[in-house]
Amino acid sequence: MTVPLWAWAVTIVIVGGFFVFDFYSHVRSPHDPTMKESAFWTVFYVGVAVLFGGGIWLAWDGEHAVQYFTGYITEQALSVDNLFVFALIMAAFKIPRRYQQKVLLIGIALALVFRTVFILIGAAIIEAWSDVFYLFAIFLVVTAVKMIVDEVRDAPQPEPKDMRLIKMLRKVFPVTDDYHEDKLLSRDSRGRRAVTPLLVALVGIGAIDLMFALDSIPAIYGITQEPFLVFATNAMALLGLRQLFFLLDGLLERLSLLSYGLAIILGYIGVKLALHAMHNNSLPFINDGEPLPVPEIPDLVSLGVVAGILAVTVVASLVKTRLEARRDERSAAAGSKS
């Protein structure tokens, strides 16, 4: 079934409406969000995503609803990985906590706009050349391997201030030394019109999210080839990302094994994409351009695999953190006795 334009329009209006609501209800007046507030709105937006999935089930069918929920869980997991880098950017630019909401909301809204462009480009490429799934599969598997290697080597995260885009911004525009409340533009000590560190951080967050989109968009196309569902999963995952950031603030370091889980998920989707590409093969140098008799992984299996990997990763991370804390306590007790 082709998704009608009115469904696209209604979805975009709903998503845009939530962003506007967030701005006027939470961000316009800077404040430090409490844990209770963050938890409530995180649950609220998860509920919105679930209701949206229920609507797909009723208006479309169960198969596409399963694809939506699998994509949403995958996107939500990948978004949590984004939060690690967002936290680094906030720390690097020393953004006061009460101003962080504005940076996150605007950065996430811009990210959704750019991701939509990527989604439409991806849909056009798939329509023109279905064998592009081979490239998507290779890219995801290579990305998964790189993530695991970086974790094993404990590769340091690049400093946000060293990003090429940030350096270019600082060369083109003067940047104020201090924050001017939650303003993005102000005047420097010489009276010149200048950007504030808040805007610099916003650019960094937008650029980082675009980099993550290079992984997430092919991954979602590995779950569903429906552009509408790809957009919906991205939109619903990004809607509650700001609240999730403050809810998990301070807990992110406890999810030390999350990157391994995400790498396994990306690798799994890469394999799923490769099987799909072989099932619909038309490359002349592979099986004389004929489809290969390979099995395709059912959508319900993918939903179980993705959810299972995340559950195991989170539980293992928390157990690991608790064991390390007990070990440190024993070491400290032994040191005090000696």
Image (cartoon, rainbow, N blue to C red):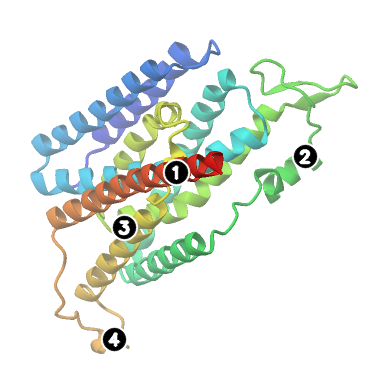
* Percent coordinates x, y for residue 93 in the rendering: 67, 33
- Tag 4: residue type? Ile
What's the residue at 28%, 71% (across, down)?
Answer: 274
Please tell me the numbered disc located at residue 170: 2
Please tell me the numbered disc located at residue 330: 1
- Tag 1: residue type? Arg
Q: Can residue 75 be seen in this view?
A: no
- Between circles 3 and 1, the one closer to the viewer is 1
Q: What element carries label 1?
A: helix
Q: Name the residue under label 4.
A: 286
User: Are the residues at dot 4 and dot 2 in contact (C-beta closer than 8 Å)?
Assistant: no
Label 3 crowd bin: few (<14), some (14–19), many (20+), radius 10 Å: many
What's the residue at 71%, 48% (across, down)?
Answer: 162
Q: Which of 125 and 27 is in front in this view?
A: 27
* Percent coordinates x, y for residue 173 in the rendering: 79, 35
> Is 255 positioned to the left or the right of 316 in the image?
right
- Tag 2: residue type? Arg
